[in-house]
Amino acid sequence: MNQFNISPGLRTTLFVLMGLGLLSMGITWFGDDELHTRFWSNFLHNSVFFTGIAVMASFFMAASILAYAGWYVAFKRVFEAVTAFLPFGLGLMVILGIGNYMHLHHLYHWTDAAVVAEDPILKGKAGFLNPNFYMIATVLFVGIYIFLINKIKGLSRSEDNAASDKDFSIHKKQRFFAAILLPVIGFTSVILIWQWIMSVDSHWYSTMFAWYCLASFFVSLMCFVALTLIYLRGNGYYQNLSQHHMHDVGKFIFAFSIFWTYLWFSQFMLIWYANVGEETIYFKERYDNYPVLFFANIAVNFVLPFIVLLRNDTKYKTGTLSFVAIIVFLFHWIDYFLMIKPGVLHTAHEVMGHGGEEAHGAAEHGAEAAGHAVEAVAAHGEHASNIVSGFTIPGLLELGTMLGFLGLFAFIVLNALSKAPLTPKNDPYLEESLHHHV
Amino acid sequence: MANHKEVIYGLYNDETELLRAVKAAKNQHIEIMDVYSPFPVHGLDPILGLEESRLHIAGFVYGMLGTLTAFLGMTWIFTKDWPVIFGGKPYWSVPAFIPITFELTVLFASIGMVVTFYIVSGMGPGITNNYLDDRITDDKFCIAFDKSEVSESDAQAFFQSTGAAEVNVKHIN
């Protein structure tokens, strides 16, 4: 079976997930504070997470083409399909970009002109952190990714109709576009991550942050690809793949989990050791108010793949690989939760405090509860719970929103996958891939 | 050791010829004494029916030993033996120990695996091994039969049919 079709059962499941997501977002919207902090932070969190995965799929394609990689060619259509989410991701980020102008949301403190005017740090960053830069960078950079990856995908499709696999002309054209795409993504994705994610903590910065995010996206991408391949192979597709292909996907999860840990720890240790207030605040906030997630993040995203995927047989056993892939995917999503929520919460707190209004909102509640927890413990001599669902831990609505986005993402990817034969024809590296052996 | 053996061996020019010959020997149920090659030949182990190497398990154990040595060593030094405050940090500052723990893990694992490999393979400084032929450390691939198990005429016929470049007989101790 070389032609994938979304089965009716899967289609229903994905639409149910999307409906669940819409329902969760609706409940979040109406149960929210006046700034809709919870709704917009969930929106940003999921948009960034799934768009980043699609960006990394483009990066992977470009890097693999340039590295003469052969092993992935038999299922390169899966990576091509993941990049099909890019236009949708661009749409989601443009909504947030428009929100910056219209003040629909208050995710970024730097969008508030009154605050920027009296804040020397934000004033100094205003040339970079402003709605125009955000919008132009998002549209321009993601637009370039879409243009170039579509060129590569178009060539890949036209290769199917080529005369023979001895014809290298199409592959050489792909190399041309990949050679442009790779450095473009390498440099510009960093700017996008500063704008999209790091600027929610608008006073804080770290030069390692973008790499750390990209590593996280890459692990998530490989987990998603592993699960997709396991699903497809379980349903009779891709029988021409062997355990060695799964082994290599597993190796990527393993290797990039360690790379992610390396970056996480390097960022943490330098800030911890230097102990400069402006930098330490980022970890202090998470260490004090998000202790469970803070340690679970590093424990699950490093220890689980390291221990389980260290042996080679666990990488090609369907059960263990899918177990690790699902949990690691979920915890990299939580990694982004930890990056985004505290900063957004702080901004909401500031904005609501600024207006001099009585703030009763949940965001206020979350920030207050978290902030006063230490005092409460001291005052009452007992442990006061500072965990607020949706703010300091993902609640059911966050999970529902994530499942909704996941359903949309999976539907777009699988729909794109059904548009072309699963195994390409005439790729010069196809034979190597089909005989891939490690 | 008075374990004299008479060995008949054929030399091949190419690892693909070697692989083909080993497969042929397995199909004809000829008992192979050993196969020598200047570098690891991909796919040879499963054809010969060799067990998976346990060297990586040893590597894991050495790595763990390195982790414990570094971590417990630093813990003892900085909390009991000679406590020093660095940069206002507590004596037992775990994040600062991690890089050294990592380095010692890698060091122990790599050196331990190299030494283990040398011991298991009977190699090392000052040890001379008798090779069947010096060229198997250079560019020749060799299949050896024990003459007490495979008759010379069978072996000759086998080497002829699989395209060995050269066939020799040698006594080894």
Image (cartoon, rainbow, N blue to C red):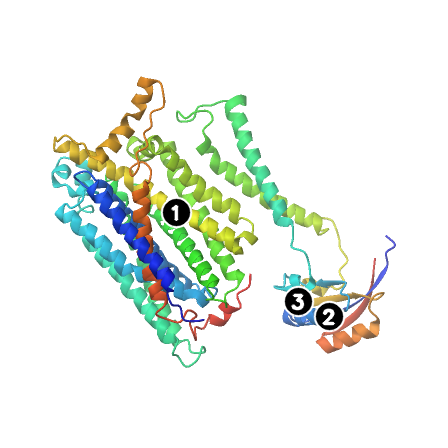
Of the two numbered discs 3 and 2 in the rendering, the one whose residue sits closer to the viewer: 2
Three-letter residue code for mark 1? Leu
Three-letter amino acid code at disc 2? Ala
Give the crowd class for mark 3: few <14, some 14-19, many >=20 residues within 10 Å: some
CA distance separating discs 3 and 2: 22 Å
Residue occupying the point 47% across, 49% down: A324
Indicate whether A400 appears above or below A7: above
Name above or below for residue A245 compared with residue B123. below
Name the mark nearer the viewer: 1 or 3: 1
User: Mark 3, chain letter?
Assistant: B
Q: Quadrant of residue B143?
A: bottom right
Q: Position of residue B38 (x, y in %)?
A: 66, 62
In primary-sequence order, the first of circles 3 and 2 is 2
Q: Circle 3 sits on which residue?
A: B139
Give the crowd class for mark 2: few <14, some 14-19, many >=20 residues within 10 Å: some
Mark-to-mark CA distance, 1 and 3: 51 Å
Describe residue A67's horizontal placement relative to residue A44 as left or right: right
Task: Tell which residue pokes out farthest to the right in this image.
Answer: B2
> A436 or A27: which is nearer to us?
A27
Q: Which residue is mark 2?
A: B25
Q: Are marks 2 and 1 in one subunit? A: no
C-alpha span from label 2 to label 1: 52 Å
Mark 1 Cα within 10 Å, few/some/many (few <14, many 20+)? some
Q: Nearer the viewer, mark 2 or mark 1?
A: 1
The residue at 34%/72% (across/down) is A155
Please tell me which residue lies in front, A47 or A365. A365
Give the amino acid at mark 3: Asp
Residue A201 sits in quarter = top left
Callouts 1 and 3 on one subunit: no
Circle 1 residue: A330
**A135 displayed left or right of A411:** left
**What secondary structure is found at the residue carrying circle 2?**
helix
